[in-house]
Image (tube, helix red, strand yellow):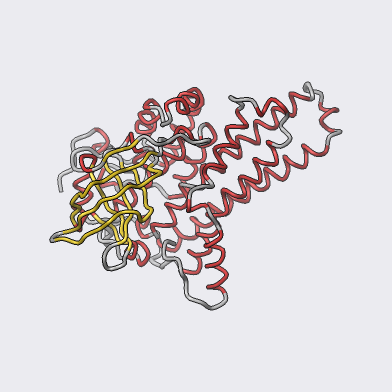
Amino acid sequence: MTLPVTPLTHRPPLRAQDIYDRVLALGDLFRRNASEARKIRKVPQDNIDALQEAGFFLALQPRRWGGHEVDPQDFFRMHLAIAENCMSTAWASGIIAVHAFQLALMDERAQQDVWGEDIHTRISSSYAPLGKVTEVEGGFRLGGRWGWSSGSDHCTWVFLGAICPDGGFRSFLVPRGDYEIVDTWHAMGLQGTGSNDIVVNDAFVPDYRTHKAEDGFLGTNPGVTADSAPLYRLPWAQLFVRVVSTPAIGAAREALDLYRQLVVGKASGDATKLAGDTAPQERIAAAITSIDEMEAILFRNFDRMMAQVTSGEEVPVLERIKYRYQASLVIERCMAVVDSLFSSAGGGSVFLGSEIQQRFLDIHTGRAHVANNPTAFARNLGSVLLGNESKDFFV
């Protein structure tokens, strides 16, 4: 395998702390560009370029392809920091960045196709099983239309979900020349994610450019060898479900900070006036506790999973089912936080352009993603704990 000649391939991988510090330094840029993101309905190119330069998109990419192979805990700290400044940028960039992890699980030929000429090549996705698949010699013919492909304008490949003739779910890796991006993203929140539609008209996808859900569940991924970092022995689903929920935690934390500023401003900085109003105090206390609990569970779960795979153990399926449910609860808990704050943020919060209103809209829009609906995951966890078989294999 020949690595592309780029500066990053000739330097040691960045430490996670280095990338995190660089991401923190981009906060002002993301805030300045937030209104532009909403206007153009996608992440501004300046944000994408800055995140690439910071190393964020390479965070989960294998070292043999110029990546940094950081632990998920470090990746999600970066993700949270981006979301505090712009949830749209965090949503789209986190989804793009996690695809490097999925590609690392696939056949090395697929990795060569994507990264062989440029290690900075990016992939978007839409995993809903909406495609029509026909099996042919050497692979499949794929066609259909998929929605919510966040960050697609900044990518030249896409992962698309479909059910194969044998009934198994696969992700199909498709190059830009084989699909069309249809501009459909006019949304009430997360306006800057560019989550447009993808249309494929009967494209050939070789078998090696597909990823079986079964491999992701069982840990039989063809790209993972004895020499692979422990990171790539984590269940694929555990990383993906967190990139569509974690941004809400960062946005909720920022909503809390905005609320505190609004309350203090109403009190004209007079602490005695604020001290006499217990309602804002209780809302603030409840909000910070809820946010801390969500962060603690996020990092606790990945601490445990990384310890297991590093020591050569498998992550027990029951634990994975529990973690899946906990991830799906994040948006609803963040909605409870932001709803409580927004409802008493004052008349100014209802006018267009209100910063706390934007967090309200972004978090509520994130709830529409199927991965953030906890109902099925709650039932599956309860059912398994009562002795039944799991009905969910994306865990």
Could you say which is closer to the camera, residue 238 or residue 314? 238
Picture coordinates of residue 225 (x, y %)? 26, 61
Could you say which is closer to the camera, residue 194 or residue 310? 194
Quadrant location of residue 335? top right
Could you say which is closer to the camera, residue 219 or residue 89? 89
Could you say which is closer to the camera, residue 322 or residue 52? 322
Picture coordinates of residue 202 (x, y %)? 21, 50
Identify the residue at image location x=34%, y=38%.
Answer: 152
Q: Residue furthest bottom?
A: 387
Q: Is residue 322 left or right of residue 151?
A: right
Quadrant location of residue 42? top left
Q: Is residue 340 left or right of residue 61?
A: right
Identify the residue at image location x=41%, y=67%.
Answer: 314
Q: Is residue 9 left or right of residue 257?
A: left
The quarter of the image holding the C terminus is: bottom left
Q: Is residue 309 left or right of residue 7?
A: right
Rendered view: 331 above or below 349: below
Identify the residue at image location x=36%, y=39%.
Answer: 57
Picture coordinates of residue 294 (x, y %)? 59, 50
Picture coordinates of residue 389 (x, y %)? 47, 75
